[in-house]
Amino acid sequence: MTPSPMIQLMKEKAEAVQAVVFQIGDFKEAVTYTIDLTKRQNGRNIAAGGLSKDQEDALREACAQAHLTLLPFPLRPHANKIHTSLTLADWGIAETGTLVIDSTKEDIRIATMLAEIHVAVLPASRIKPDAEALEREIDGILKKDAPAYLAFITGASRTADIERVLAIGVHGPKELHILITG
Amino acid sequence: MIKTPSDMKSYKERIRKALTDPFLRSALDKFNTQYRENRPRIYAGVDFEGIRDEIAAAKDDALPALMDLYESFKKHAEASGAKVHLVRDAEEANRTISEIARENGVKKIAKSKSMTAEEIFLNDHLIEAGYEVIETDLGEWIIQLRHEGPSHMVMPAIHLSRYQVGDLFGKVTGKKQDSENIDKLVKVARERLRPAFLTAGMGISGANFALADSGALGMVTNEGNMRLVTTLPSVHVALVGIEKLVPNLKSALRILKVLPRNATGQAITSYVTWIKGANESLSSFSHRKILHIVFLDNGRLAMAKDPIFSEALRCIRCGACANVCPIYSKVGEHRYGHVYIGAIGLILTLFYHGKESDRVIVQNCLNCQACKSVCPVDIDLPYLIKKTYRLVLDQENRKPVKNLLLSRILKNRKLFHFLLRRAYLAQKPFAAGDTVIRHLPHFFEKAHGFRSLPVIAKTPFRDRWKRIAPKAEASGKTVALFAGCAVDFIYPEQGESLFEILQKQNVGLEFPLDQTCCGLPAMMAAEEETSKELARQNIEAFADVKAEHILTLCASCASHLKHNYPKILGDSPEVKAFTDKIIDFSSYMINILKVIPEQFLPSGKKVAYHAPCHLCRGLGVHREPRELITVCGASYVPSKDEDVCCGFGGSYSVDFPEISSEILKKKLDNVEASGAEILVTDCPGCVLQLRGGMDKRGRGIEVKHLAELCAQSLKSSAT
């Protein structure tokens, strides 16, 4: 299957900022990917963020089989020891390889900010060409008279504060993996 | 607390120290070069100028309505559980934030990067009030540990080497660090600062946008610390300059297209975060975040109403004006600004930190236009710097001797020209029959000896004109020459070269004798009344001249006449009739006379080109001079950084010879490396600087005005 130009651009731009991008079939493959990745890095646990009940059950079962801990909610007490987080992305922005994640729930924030490794699942149908194409959706979230925390995430956390040398993994995740489904 | 010298003597001492710091010199030089080289790639496919104009226009619309935007923001933010404050000045901001900390029983505060917090010296205040404050941005943490201020708006520790950071982290951790391994040094910060996020009672951040129609804040970051600072502690205080208010998401997304590109060369930063209201937070008793948004006025609301300086409030803090500044790349660090660094810093310092901190640094500008050309919100930085200098002088109610002289002499053309003729006699003993002065009289400081100086011509162009004028025979086209002081009195032979070319092309030449100095030197010295008077005199001098174009051989005059006259005199039809006619030499040759190689005798000489600041950036002329070199039969050899300033800047090279000579050195090194036999440029000021420097080197590279190169090889049209 040849990916659509938009998926191709999303992949290219995300890889340009050191994200690891794969196209996969369904969520089950994402679970397998996350478990393998965690075990390969000798991680002990996984935190979920924003998954549906079914997705969470599937992850729990797979974790149990692989002898990994699926961290219970709320995540705050475990904030300092999360190895991998598996979350859903609400949208993708192809032009810059960006994930848009509604992080209004504190658990999603903690999972995406404090994990060593962040794995995000992005449905191909939710990839938009640029940020402007998401204006209505973002405004929909921000314009409600209710609290909101919305994140654009592009690659892993980075700095060039020492001699302008790029270093990956400062305070946020050291790796970002994007799994495009559908 | 940052201390910026308020007297020139101590400032110069600091500059001399910077010029001898090898790490700083090479780091900043490399940065400047790489930034400029990467820019075209970063902006590939993006209409920089189009977006820049849109942002500038949108900012100009928003600034007069700041209070309306504020009210709208407050309504929406408070409806979602935030508390919004507007504070008048630094003192009130510090008090308010410290009060919020006290009310919430906070002991430890984790901070993410905020220039606005630097502006009000928030850390000093909070530490004095008994709080523990930890900077969590890597660069900010480093300079906090070193008790320094930021040396760049985006890269606050750019002045430090990996070894300095390694030693520092060694002391902090009590363990020797491998300075060569920057990745590991970064991980030291990750490990050391993690507990700070988890145990702090309050987080303080800045914000890049405040969206008026939703009450949300937008933050543009890379390291991820801001996300932790705004998530983990129970209290979040966002300190925001009130000019960060924008009407809506659309305006913010437009700025987001250029901010990361201009700041760090990224299409987008790792994180762009939109925060609204009291989000869920299990760290707080109510399970809701306690969010306070503190908008800082500190003179901004008054500035927004100022017809001239409101432009400075468009600034989105990308830091690019420092990145491309040839002076910053030489003296860098804290020597090119107070809290805010770079060209914008020379302006804002007066407004936010007062004249004492700005009075000396504001004079350190070459007017090379490099900052203006990269500014993503189109602030006329060099112009505002001069306006700021004028405000400083007005506030201090004093006029330097230079200004008194400029005003007395320049306004009176006959007196000015009389003095120039007298100068010819005065310099005679030093010139020793030569066209240059190699050894300056002893009353000059040693620092001025980096170049030979030209002698004032015995017969200025205006006197030669009287002899040659009647012979000109026009065949349709007529052009008027605006000579400028340098061509008229120092290099009349450049004017004669033009005359020769025009004669061979059967083009008539007019030279109105009432023309005088263009007024740029007066503007550079913030002598506004004088520059206005000179502008008026020149427009009058050319009012009755029948010519389709007014040609100048001096790029600085041309750019000043064309772009600053409307600013100085207002945009009247009379001014427009004058400015519309202004054209530079090579544009006239290539686009109007449409000269072709067949009209020239090829010399085949290898010729390098220096692009005068006011030609390439001032007038936007890039192609024509290079094309003309080839058309006139020479072999154009490109050299590195052709469009970087030569360090002349008029009286700048006299006021700051140490910096001027360093900039010139790099320029001449690049020209020598190109293998050129001749260096041409199209500005007599640049000729003065470059020829003076080349003469001192004595390696035989000739420096010429492009008109001289052309005149030599142009065949007579009669043949």
Image (spheres, helix red, strand yellow):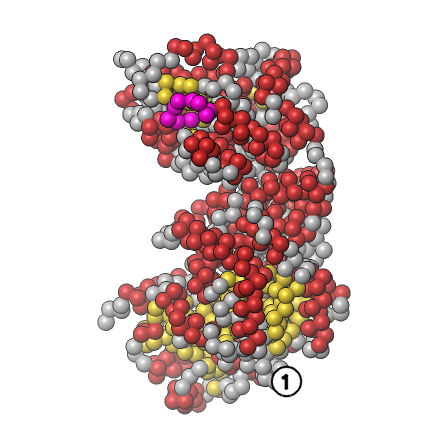
Q: Residue at x 46, y 58 (%)?
A: B255
Q: Residue at x 63, y 60 (%)?
A: B297
Q: What residue span does the magenta drawing correspond to?
A: B542-550
Q: Residue at x 63, y 69 (%)?
A: B85
Q: Residue at x 54, y 18 (%)?
A: B489
**Is B100 drawn above or below residue B283 in the view shown?**
above
Q: Secondary structure at mark 1?
A: loop
B650 horizontally vs B496: left or right: right
Quadrant placement of the N terminus of chain B: bottom right
Which SS does the magenta portion mostly show? loop
Instruction: Report the number of numbered marks.
Output: 1
**Is B618 drawn above or below residue B449 in the view shown?**
below
What residue sits right under mark 1 in the picture? Answer: B285
**Residue B129 percent coordinates (x, y):** 76, 68
From the viewer's side, name the closer residue of A44 and B211.
B211
Residue B657 visible from this viewpoint: no
**Residue B379 percent coordinates (x, y):** 52, 47
Q: Residue furthest left?
A: A1
Residue A6 visible from this viewpoint: yes
**Residue B112 percent coordinates (x, y):** 60, 66
Given the image, what chain letter belongs to the residue carrying mark 1?
B
Badge 1 density bin: few <14, some 14–19, many ≥20, Cα 10 Å: few
From the viewer's side, name the closer residue of A167 and B556.
B556
Quadrant placement of the C terminus of chain B: top left
Query: For residue A163, which quarter of the picture?
Result: bottom right
Specify the amino acid type for callout 1: Phe
**Residue B142 percent coordinates (x, y):** 64, 60
From the viewer's side, name the closer residue of B46 and B333.
B46
Query: For residue B430, which quarter of the picture?
Result: top right
Q: Is residue B617 magenta?
A: no
